[in-house]
Image (cartoon, rainbow, N blue to C red):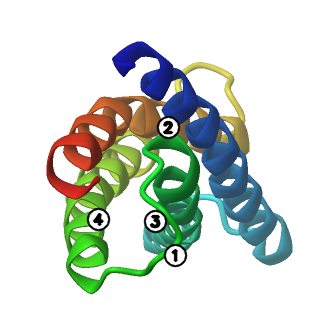
Amino acid sequence: MFSFQFIKFICVGLLNTGIDFGILNLLMFVTGINSGIICSFFKAISFMVAVTNSYFLNKLWTFNKGRDFEKKEFVRFITISLIAFGINVTFFSVLNNLIGPLGNISPVLWANISALVATGLTTLINFFGYKRFVF
C-alpha cells in the first residue's frame, strides 16, 4: 500500500513539477527576468499553483479520500505545503540568486536547475507530511 501510494504521489508530483516549471518559465520568458527577487516571486507563484493542483489530485487519487471538501484537512494541507514552500523557495533563491550560474551555464538553465534541486528537497517532506497529518 505504502509503495503504491508513493508511486502515485510521484506521478502527481511529476505533473505538478511540470506545472511549476511551465509557469516559472512562462513568467521568465514573458518578462525577460530570470534572477533576483522578482524571479523568486515568480517561483512562489508557480509553486502555489502547483500545490493547489496537488491538493485535489492527492486527495482524490493518491490517498483516495473522496471528493468532499474538508476545511480542517485543507488547512493542514496548506500548512504542510507552506513549510515545503518556505524550504523550496529558500533553496531556489540561495542557489539561483546567491550562488548563481556555475561555469558557462545560462541563467535560465541555472534557474531551472535551482528549481529542480528545490523540488527534490521538498518531495519527501510533502509526502510524509500529507500522509501523516493531512490524509
In the rendered image, the residue lying farthest to the left is 133
Hey, what amino acid is under mark 2?
A: Ser
Q: What is the x, y in percent for residue 23?
A: 72, 64
Hey, what amino acid is under mark 4?
A: Phe
Q: What is the x, y in percent for residue 30?
A: 84, 74
Decide if residue 128 is on the left or right side of residue 116: left
**How many neighbours does mark 3 have within 10 angstroms: few (below 14), some (14-19), or many (20 or more)?**
many
Which residue shows up at 42% across the image and 81% down it?
A: 69
119 vs 79: above or below: above
Mark 4 or mark 2, earlier in chain: 4
Label 4 residue SS: helix
The residue beneath circle 2 is 114
Label 3 vs label 1: CA separation? 5 Å
In the rendered image, the residue lying farthest to the right is 30
- Residue 101 appears in view: no
Which residue shows up at 53% across the image and 24% down it?
A: 102
The residue beneath circle 3 is 40
Assess whether mark 3 and mark 2 are in contact (beta carbons under 8 angstroms).
Answer: no
The quarter of the picture where residue 83 lies is bottom left
| 68 or 72: nearer the viewer | 68
Hey, what amino acid is under mark 3?
A: Ser
Assess whether mark 1 and mark 3 are in contact (beta carbons under 8 angstroms).
Answer: yes
The residue beneath circle 1 is 38
Mark 2 or mark 1, earlier in chain: 1
Q: What is the x, y in percent for residue 82?
A: 26, 66
Label 2 residue SS: helix
In the rendered image, the residue lying farthest to the bottom is 71
Which residue shows up at 31% across the image and 43% down it?
A: 126
Decide if residue 47 is on the left or right side of residue 71: right
Label 2 vs label 1: CA separation? 15 Å
